[in-house]
Amino acid sequence: MTLVQLRHLISLAHTGSFSQSAQALHLTQPALSRSVRALEDELGMPLFDRIGRRNELTVFGREVLERARLLVSEAEALRDRGHPLTRLRKGVSFEAVQRYPIASTPLSDEVARGLVETYGPQAHPANCVTLQCEELPSIADVVRQSDTVLLAVHESAPDLVELRMEPPMRGTARFGLVTLRQRTEAPALAILRRLMKERMAGA
């Protein structure tokens, strides 16, 4: 079983057509058929029912598809995590970080002071941050697709690789949950409070 075969499975499940998938994957239709058949042979059960011109996943095929998507996604994430700074054997200096774009949400004066005390005036956010946005998920997406370095608490984007800085920055973070006065709280807010408490206690 290979990642290539799993990608073929995912494509065929999406299109339901060997010809369409073969075209999208830049393969001949017989090559795609052989790949899917080899996967079925290895797993010992059919993945698709051929119904007329359409290929429908079997019950077993749906289970395999779910796992295939996870495996392919994880493999792509591992491939994309190859930022040059993660390959350094020793701790990462701030000078090395400055060779890449730096992104963050607006940082507090306290965080800015901590950066300057640890790494010098060049580490002040006004001097080093090249991309700033209020939306942390948007910034994290940019970081995942580029060599940009994110200045943030690791728990805010746990799938990203944390750089081991030298010297390490010592500091604490404070978080708050803000609600609007005289508004009925959403039922999920109690769950969110509990999850925040658990995550922060674990961190």
Image (cartoon, rainbow, N blue to C red):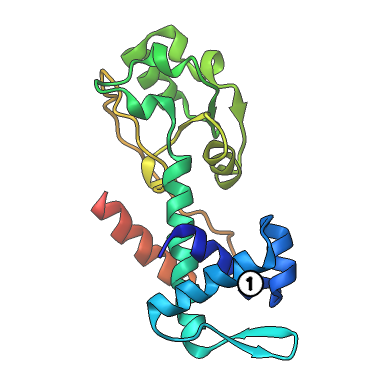
Image coordinates of residue 118 in percent, x first then y, are 31, 15
Mark 1 crowdedness (10 Å alpha carbons): few <14, some 14-19, many ≥20: many
In front here: 101 or 173?
A: 101
Image coordinates of residue 199 in percent, x first then y, are 32, 56
In front here: 161 or 10?
A: 10
Q: Which residue is drawn at 49% across and 86% down?
A: 46
Q: Residue furthest top?
A: 121
| Location of residue 90 with respect to 120 vertically, above or below | below
| 93 sits left or right of 9 in the view | left
Q: Residue at x 42, y 42 (%)?
A: 160
Q: Which residue is drawn at 60% across and 72% down?
A: 33
In front here: 150 or 202?
A: 150
Image coordinates of residue 26 in percent, x first then y, are 69, 55
Which quadrant, please, contains the N terminus?
bottom left
Q: Does the rendering let one see residue 186?
A: no
Q: Mark 1 points at which residue?
A: 12
Q: What element carries label 1?
A: helix
| 33 sits left or right of 43 in the view | right
| 74 sits left or right of 55 in the view | left
Q: Does the rendering let one see residue 121?
A: yes
